[in-house]
Amino acid sequence: MFDDLRDLYQEVILDHGRRPRHAHRPEQVDATAKGDNPMCGDRVQVFVRYAPDGSIAETGFDARGCAISIASADLMAETVQGRTPDDARALFAAFREMARTGVCPECGGEKFDEALERLQPLSGVHEYPSRVKCATLPWHALVAALAGEKESTSE
Amino acid sequence: MNVTTPILAPGRLDVARVREDFPILGETVRGKPLVFLDSAASAQKPRVVIDAMRETMETQYANVHRGLHWMSERTTDAYEGTRDAMAALINAPDRHEIVFVRNSTEAINLVAHSFGRGILKPGLAVLISGMEHHSNIIPWMMLREAYGTELRVAPITDAGELDMAGFEALLADGKVGLVAITHMSNVLGTYTPAERIVQIAHAHGAKVLFDGSQAVVHRRVDVQALDCDFYAITGHKLYGPTGIGVLWARRELLERMPPFMGGGEMISSVSYERATWAEVPHKFEAGTPAIIEAIGLKAAIGYVQSIGYEAIAAHEASLTEHAMARLSAIEGVHILGRAQDRGGVVSFVLDRAHAHDVATLLDRQGIAVRAGHHCAEPLMRRFGVESTARASFGVYTTREEIDALGDTLERVREFFA
Ligand SMILES: Cc1ncc(COP(=O)(O)O)c(C=O)c1O
């Protein structure tokens, strides 16, 4: 019945939506920010711990939301680990393009290939304009945390 | 304009015939027939409404109350006719008590502004309930901010009914000047016991405003029998167009209330030194109104009356009963609210699936439900949820559509199992 929805709800998304690996607060939190989508009530708080060299050592989150926003937060935590804040922001720009349009032809170069492949299952949201924000919400919160802000401004 | 009578026998609604009156119901969504279960957000429009608006623009349109010419007089007659139609619909004793506004949000803001600042004495409180739409919360918070008017909230029970003891207790000190409460919850489907609310409130010296946005769609409203003081209606949920709604209020209150907005239409004479206000209700109707929409609303009222509230109520009661039974039978589905007296709005959550995911999956099958907080965040919190999915019914809703919802939800459950 929902065969065509498998584009949106791929197994990876259902799995990470149901059993997120990073849905916790790290022992040490160097930066944190909240994001919420007042239209639908989704909320997320992202926590970041930095490594001594300033790169992202660990990301965790606390979220109330749909499968897509939880899976997106989880895959985000996975793919930004070890990156510099600048790289994380660049990855978000690429991911956002993918979420909006389904593809990102000029994205990144090699350094993002693997991450974008991980995030690719979320690109199905581009066919559901009202759901794109679900996928980008945790990233907005991350970018706000990296900038030292407490709350993300939504698009 | 002629309204066909979609009635089989008195008290019965022939849903197949009713559906023919709504052009949009012939549409398909994602290749599937539209199953529209979101009427509580806004109802679809019958052809008579569409035609009335089109005919107005094609044959007799001009501004109202202004031109001394044929077109303006014609349009004014049609427009003012809506006042009579609405007065008849809700049994208002006086057509001048019908104030045109954009929607019920504006109706409530009008009361908060004009009655709240102009008549409610400083130091008095406004009492709302725990199941209000933001439209009946925020205006009172703004009044509190501007004027220090206290805001009290009457509790609701786990069944989603007004806690009458709690309600009465909040009136006990005699400080409540206005009770502003929904007549039917847009989330729980609960009808509040309107007559009792009025009796108790009046006994404690408080006026009563009902937010009738939902109630008037589903059951006959008689403002004289209710004995309330204000009643807010929004046209687009009543099968009418957007942009037109009605505030009904007792004339004696309207006479005493200061205007809400200033401009043309609401004055009697103007110099730079002073202005005097037009008669009620024009005093509250500044600026060029929603003329075409008002005329559309009259057609909608005629349409509802042609079916009849008895038939509408019976149809929706049977749909609601069916929906409650069908959805309750699905493992993992939890319905919010179990009020004794309820109408055709059913909110639910599904274990392991978020309301938005549920709505997206239903949408793929052409089924439109609303998902979210339904502009009632405090109520969501009361029930410990962030959001729900909501199915709501109208005159055109069929049992088969509810079965389609039920069957699809079974699959949604498996999908997220
Ligand atoms: C109970 C209730 N009150 C108020 C409103 C506000 O209606 P409107 O947006 O038309 O002003 C709604 C509908 O959204 C409602 O369901």
Image (cartoon, coloured by chain):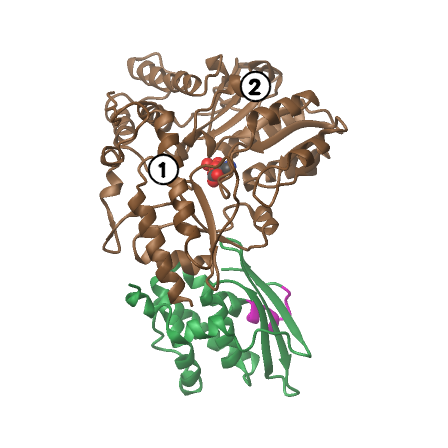
Chain colours: A green, B brown
Q: Position of residue B103 (x, y in %)?
A: 47, 32
Of the numbered discs 2 and 1, the one sitting upstream in the chain is 2
Q: Which residue is mark 2?
A: B227
- In the visual, does B404 lie left or right of B337? left
Quadrant for the C terminus of chain B in the image: bottom left
Q: Chain of mark 1?
A: B
- Look at label 1 and name its amino acid: Gly
Task: Give the residues drawn in magenta, as a range.
Answer: A141-150
Looking at the image, which residue is at 52% across and 13% down? B279
Measured as percent of width and height from the top left, residue A114 is found at: 42, 85
Tell me if residue A89 comes above or below residue B208 in the rendering: below
Amino acid on which the number 2 mark rests in the picture:
Asp
Q: Is residue B44 left or right of residue B129?
A: left
Q: Secondary structure at mark 1?
A: loop
Quadrant (top left/top right/bottom left/bottom right) for the N terminus of chain B: top left
The magenta stretch spans residue B326: no
In the depicted structure, whether residue B368 falls above or below residue A1: above
Q: Dot 1 corresponds to which residue?
A: B394
Q: Is residue B161 visible?
A: yes
